[in-house]
Amino acid sequence: MTLSTVSTLVLIGIVSISSPVLAEFTGRLAIPGVVFEIALGIVIGPAVLGIAHPGSVVVALEEMGLAYLMFLAGLELDLARIRGRSLQLAATGWVISLALALLIAVALTLIGTVIDAVVIGLALTTTALGTLLPILRDAGLFEGRFGARVMAIGSVGEFAPILAVGVLLDRRNPEITSALLVVFAVVAVAAALVAARPQPPKMTGFLHRHVHSSAQLPIRVAMLLIITLVLMTYELGLDVLLGAFAAGIVVKLFAR
């Protein structure tokens, strides 16, 4: 690693420590630490001070960190809580948001601000589920109907644009992309069904004994599952976030 890479990693470490400290000083405003992380990241990045440089190591850590964040989102997701009315409202809200976003994008295209209205329209409908869930949990709002509604909205707003981008903007034919999405969905569902089945007591006991040992075998199994599903989505030409999110759901079912 170069000196620039090491110094950037040190700056990232400083930001990660100072952000929750600054959030604590906001008192009743209760500004989440992630807000300070984003703001400080912009300040030290190329857009402002330019003292942090996105080298190859930093970019690799960024991609792994984003995949792990989506894994945690899948791990936190409770499908039983968001189904029904919450999921219906979330889907309806996203369709309305998509219509408004496309109108705004078309207007921006007509005045010459942007080139592709579809890209901008889909981008305006996205949410940050991996950022929303920790904020809700830290604020004590994760449980209850409000948390379920936000979780449903975040899930739909996170993955509906990913699927739309894959189908509409992929260089391949939409039929091929749709078929690949079906293949991935079948594999993910099969893995979830296997994980949800009662496991042999010997295997469960074996994994339980190694949770707090130096081997930490269950964590290694979870990491292998994340990397495998991410690799699968990468090889299929799909968004790797789908693989990380599916891995979180499968690990949660297995942990139960």
Image (spheres, helix red, strand yellow):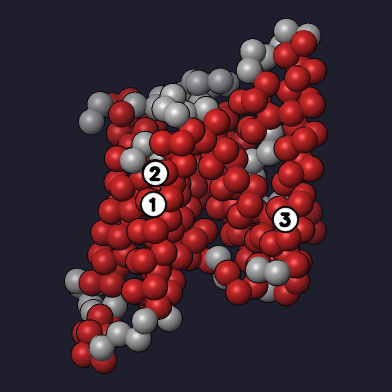
Question: Would residue 239 be seen by someone viewing this image from the given angle?
Answer: no
Q: CA distance from mark 3 to mark 1?
A: 23 Å
Report x, y in % for residue 211.
Answer: 29, 78
Identify residue type, mark 3. Answer: Ala
Please report the residue visible at 45 percent of the width from the left and 29 percent of the height from the top.
Answer: 173
Query: Where's the N terminus, which quadrant?
Result: top left
Callout 1 touching callout 2 (CB < 8 Å): yes
Describe the element under mark 1 as helix, strand or loop: helix
Report x, y in % for residue 71.
Answer: 44, 57
Report x, y in % for residue 75.
Answer: 48, 65
Residue corresponding to mark 2: 180
Report x, y in % for residue 14.
Answer: 47, 43
Please report the residue visible at 36 percent of the width from the left and 81 percent of the height from the top.
Answer: 197
The disc, 3 or 1, on the residue closer to the chain's N-terminal end is: 3
Describe the element under mark 3 as helix, strand or loop: helix
Identify residue type, mark 2. Answer: Leu
In screen coordinates, is 91 left or right of 195? right
Which of 206/140 is in front?
Answer: 206
Identify residue type, mark 1. Answer: Phe
In screen coordinates, is 26 left or right of 211? right
Residue corresponding to mark 1: 184
Q: CA distance from mark 1 to mark 2?
A: 6 Å
Residue corresponding to mark 3: 90
The disc, 3 or 2, on the residue closer to the chain's N-terminal end is: 3
Q: CA distance from mark 3 to mark 2?
A: 25 Å
Describe the element under mark 2 as helix, strand or loop: helix
